[in-house]
Image (tube, grey):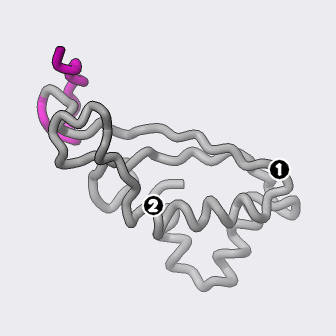
């Protein structure tokens, strides 16, 4: 359930949104019961982001928070899937990138390695 998935679903008329979710998750459809959710942005997002950008050395993640992308493009369709599924839908969260401040190259993209926490 990437941002682009939600963005494209949201562009559909409401009746078609409901039909699409039912086709994937209901007992009238494919009965999917596992959703992979990027933790932050991914290569299928309109922009690169994490849940703790712009807070250097926040190793306790006190500024970790969801974004409008989650509230608008991920969570509504995850909830819809859970409502129509005859099974308990499970979610698999996976990060695309660590915040830039956590990486040795200080960039969200272009590789880099995770820095160790200062002692």
Image point (12%, 30%), residue name: 105
Considering the image in quadrants, where does the C terminus appear?
top left
Q: Which residue is mark 1?
A: 87
Q: Is residue 6 visible?
A: yes
Identified at 15% across, 39% down, the residue is 56
Asked whether 2 or 69 is in front, the reply is: 69
Q: Earlier in the sequence, mark 1 or mark 2?
A: 2
Residue furthest top in the image: 119
Percent position (x, y) of residue 100? 19, 39
Q: Is residue 42 above or below residue 112?
A: below
Picture residue at 70% right of the left edge, 75% below the top: 18
The quadrant of the image that shows the N terminus is: bottom right
- The quadrant holding residue 83 is bottom right
Is residue 41 something one can see in this rendering?
Answer: no
Q: Residue under circle 2?
A: 70
Query: Residue 67, position in %: x, y?
Result: 37, 60
Q: Residue at x 80, y 53 (%)?
A: 31
Q: Is residue 17 shown left or right of residue 111?
A: right
Q: Name which quarter of the figure residue 3 lies in.
A: bottom left
| 80 versus 112 height, above or below | below
The CA span between labels 1 and 2 is 23 Å
Q: Is residue 91 left or right of residue 100?
A: right
Residue density around tag 2, few if under 14, some if 14–19, many if 20 or more, within 10 Å: some
Q: Quadrant of residue 91?
A: top right
Q: At which x and y percent is residue 10?
A: 52, 75
Q: Residues within 10 Å of mark 1 (few under 14, many from 20)?
A: some
Give the SS element for disc 2. Answer: helix
Residues in magenta, as a range: 105-119
Predominant secondary structure, magenta span: loop
């Amino acid at each position: 359930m990437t941002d682009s998935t939600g963005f494209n679903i949201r562009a559909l008329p409401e009746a078609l949104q409901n039909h699409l979710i039912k086709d994937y998750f209901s007992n009238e459809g494919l009965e999917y019961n596992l959703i992979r959710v990027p933790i932050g942005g991914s290569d299928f997002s309109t922009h690169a982001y994490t849940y703790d950008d712009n807070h250097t050395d926040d190793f306790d993640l006190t500024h970790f928070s969801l974004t409008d992308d989650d509230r608008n493009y991920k969570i509504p369709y995850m909830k819809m899937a859970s409502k129509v599924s005859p099974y308990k839908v499970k979610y698999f969260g996976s990060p695309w990138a660590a915040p830039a401040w956590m990486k040795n190259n200080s960039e969200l993209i272009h590789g880099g390695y995770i820095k160790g926490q200062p002692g």
